[in-house]
Image (cartoon, rainbow, N blue to C red):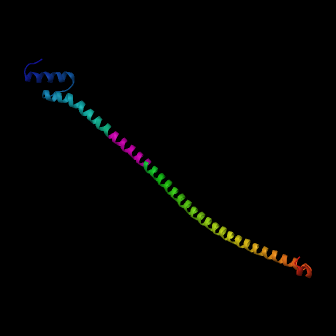
Amino acid sequence: MPANGHDKELFFRKWGEISGLGVYPSLCELVEGIVTVPLKAQLAETRQERERDRADHAAELERIEKRLIEERDATRDEAQEARAEADHAKADQVRMARDVATMFDELKALSNRYGELHADRARLQADVDRLTTELEQARRPWWRRLVGR
């Protein structure tokens, strides 16, 4: 191995010619060529991988966003459907409550009418009883009516 800087440079030049690395003006350029050329290739490859990863990530985000939008729309449709069903059920409930109130009013009217008819029947029965008694007394001979038998 050469001792001084000039000899080192000459050594590396010769070694580069022999090894096929070409001629480098200095040891720094040789080391730079040995280190940076693979690093540049590795950096370019890493950048390409990163770009692919970014593209894959963007595509995945688009798929997720599309799925979430579809789920949101489906959920919104279900909610609107449920709201419509609830509104329909509420309308049915109001209608049924109105029908029940009408039925109770009719039942009350029928009950009042039954009470009136029952009172009329009792009154008529009392009239029938009174008239029956009067008829029986009228059929009795006059002398029994007079005596009170």
Q: Magenta segment range?
A: 51-67
Residue 139: percent from left, percent from top: 90, 79
Residue 58: percent from left, percent from top: 36, 44
Q: On the picture, is 73 further left or further right than 95?
A: left
Residue 44: percent from left, percent from top: 27, 36
Does 124 sit above or below residue 91? below
**In the rendered image, which quarter contains the N terminus?**
top left
Is 5 colored magenta in this rendering? no
Compare residues 23 and 107 and report the one nearer the observer: 107
Residue 140 is drawn in which quadrant? bottom right
**In the rendered image, which quarter contains the C terminus?**
bottom right
- Residue shown at 69% from the left, 69% from the top: 110
* Magenta span main SS: helix
- Residue shown at 66% from the left, 67% from the top: 107
Q: On the picture, is 36 further left or further right than 63?
A: left
Compare residues 59 and 112 and report the one nearer the observer: 112
Compare residues 43 and 148 and report the one nearer the observer: 148
Q: On the picture, is 73 further left or further right than 133?
A: left
Does 46 sit above or below residue 84? above
Residue 35: percent from left, percent from top: 21, 29
Does 7 sit above or below residue 132? above
- Residue shown at 7% from the left, 21% from the top: 4
Compare residues 36 and 20 and report the one nearer the observer: 36
Is 53 colored magenta in this rendering? yes
Does 16 sit above or below residue 55? above
Residue 47 is drawn in which quadrant? top left
- Residue shown at 13% from the left, 26% from the top: 27
